[in-house]
Image (cartoon, coloured by chain):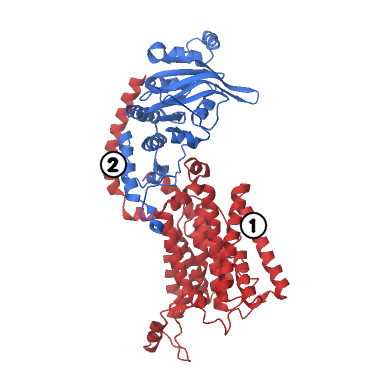
Amino acid sequence: MVPVIELAKVRKTFGSVIALDGVSFDVYPGEVHCLLGDNGAGKSTLIKVLSGVHQPTQGTIRIDGQDVQFKSPRDAYKAGVATVFQDLAMLPLMSITRNFFLGREPTKGRGIFRRFDAKFADVVTRKEMVRIGIDIRDPGQAVGTLSGGERQGLAIARATYFGAKVLILDEPTSALGVHQASMVLKYIDQARKNGIGVVFITHNINHAYPIGDRFTLLNRGTSHGTFKKAEISREEILRVMAGGEDLDALMEQLPGVEA
Amino acid sequence: MSEASAESSKAIRIEKKGAGSDASRLAKQSWFSHVMHRPESGAVSGLVFVYVFFVLFANGSGMFSAEGLMNIFKVSAELGILAVSVSLLMIAGEFDLSIGSMVALAGLIIGVGVAKLGLSLPVAVMIAFVFSLLIGAFNGYLVVRTKLPSFIVSLATMFILRGVAVAATRMLTGKTQISYVVNELNQNSWVVSLFSGHLFTGLFQTLAEHGVIDMRPDGLPAVQGIPMSILWWLAISALATWMLLRTRLGNWIFATGGDLNAARNMGVPVDKVRILLFMFSAVSATLFATIQVLESGSADTLRGIQKEFEAIIAAVIGGSLLTGGYGSAIGSMFGALIFGTVQIGMFYTGIDTDWFKVFLGVMVLLAVLFNDYIRKMATSSR
């Protein structure tokens, strides 16, 4: 099987700062690939390269095995790479339907009578939300009435509906409570079942480990390797993320602490 | 740990179902709360209050005669034409303080064109409209390009346009007032009937002859017909409402004002939307000016002063948020109607009209507080 998106030995520098150094990363269809790393590890830079915001200084990006160059997020989007950033690009005062179709509104009629096809949009929105596991009461209600987890679900459903092959989720659970976060994990699982390759960025191993198929650990701009779930334990991931021996030393000083 | 959390979340969900399943929540929502969630609800209740007040205190004063009502509608219509475009701009998160000056300038272009340059009335009106499109585009371009708040940018153009209007008029004509813009030569022009004519004049004549409405001593009805300004107001408001609620552009306007970056990230052409709306506000100012000039027959550099604020007041009363992203075009109609009713009503009740501005200020405060409350309701779970 060919990875739906692949970064090969990508290097990205900002002036003299090396943000990414020879990082390779790939996602297969129907897989959740977790990208783990502490603050400043290069997670943000990596997803910005994946989503076309930044262009790699060296290295290549491949979509379905073909070399591509993303000049803008729009290029990436057209290639089927959808990124859900932390702000979600949601408008709380607008309805669920209007948010769902924002910028890609279905229309009917011609010329000056070309208008927003509200009925079709409502039907699709409700159907897509149910498909991901959210039973909305009224697609006309404001997005502000949804919980944080449901908004993530809406963003995922939206990206899926508009033909995403790769879904990049930037810290989708970080601002959420326990119950909301587990709902988001359920939505991610649903997207995976629909055959989408999911890149799940987080620094919370408790969210990543149950859902992830593979894990890539980033530290200071370099990759510490990609591991299948069977190959690595939760504790091992945490140890690498935190900087290895530093954490071990800390553990010895703080008796009674478990990772 | 994950098994445990899944277990507990299941338990929680069952509890929620018991408290109120989805179907029963839908049923519980009354039409009243649905109506109250609309951005216009504040303006409509304000309008009801205003009419109850004047029916109690001004009944029999002639305020509710055909003539009085037509006066109310005329004042409301003229402000309403401005308020519609201002409310669209506010929904998109922008202000245009230059429309008052645009009113003066557009009127003077028509006046100078006809009285000084000898242009025909249709040509002069056309030039005014083309010019306003350019001014609007310039305003919009400045805002999107400089990324400065439109409040500041349009404050600058407000002074620039007013200054140009006064200086150029005085330079060309030596005066600040131009009379006889509509004269014997052009008073039968189609432009005059289009902007300042009356509809249903025959019907109103018949009504007057049968004593339904008052007749003047000269045998003409007290109300000649429905002024074109009212028709323009209704047409432009209906168009704006349709556009806002039923077209892609409408969706983009809400999104632009709701969150500029989010809208841009979703592929909404936010710059184009804003430039277009600034053009629309300049055009509606010119429409207002044309109606005024053709009705009064003269142009004046003092026209349109404070109209930008009055239009913002009408839009705010109509439910548009100062922060953008929420509001209604039809609400601005109700806002303008409250404005016109109180202004004319005060005259009929004999309240010193100096108090009008006090009333306006209080209305604005109440409207802003109410809008804030409505917004909270709209984003709270229903």
Answer left or right for B129 relative to B66.
right
Answer left or right for A169 relative to A108.
right
Q: Earlier in the sequence, mark 2 or mark 1?
A: 2
Residues packed near mark 1 inside 10 Å, few (<14), some (14 to 19) or many (20 plus) = some
Residue A79 image offset from top left, x and y in percent: 44, 33
* Disc 2, SS: helix
Q: Which residue is mark 1?
A: B155
| Dot 1: chain letter | B
Residue B28 image offset from top left, x and y in percent: 29, 48
Q: Give me the residue at 50% from left, 74% from top.
A: B195
Q: Nearer the viewer, residue B295 or A117?
A: A117
- Residue type marked 2: Asp
Residues packed near mark 2 inside 10 Å, few (<14), some (14 to 19) or many (20 plus) = some
Q: Nearer the viewer, residue B346 or A49?
A: A49
Q: Which residue is mark 2?
A: B22
Compared with A232, B330 (above or below) is below
Q: Nearer the viewer, residue B154 or A199?
A: A199
Q: Quadrant of residue B282?
A: bottom right
Q: Colour of chain B?
A: red
Q: What distance separates the C-alpha of mark 2 from that of mark 1?
A: 50 Å
Q: Does residue A175 show up?
A: yes
Chain identifier, blue in the render? A
| Dot 2: chain letter | B
Q: Give me the residue at 33% from left, 38% from top.
A: A129
Q: Does residue A259 show up?
A: no
Residue B348 image offset from top left, x and y in percent: 50, 77
Specify whether disc 2 shares its chain with disc 1.
yes
Q: Give me the residue at 52% from left, 71% from top.
A: B343
Residue A213 image offset from top left, x and y in percent: 38, 19
* Disc 1, SS: helix
Compared with B53, B135 (above or below) is above
Q: Tell me the quarter of the image containing the N terminus of chain A.
A: top left
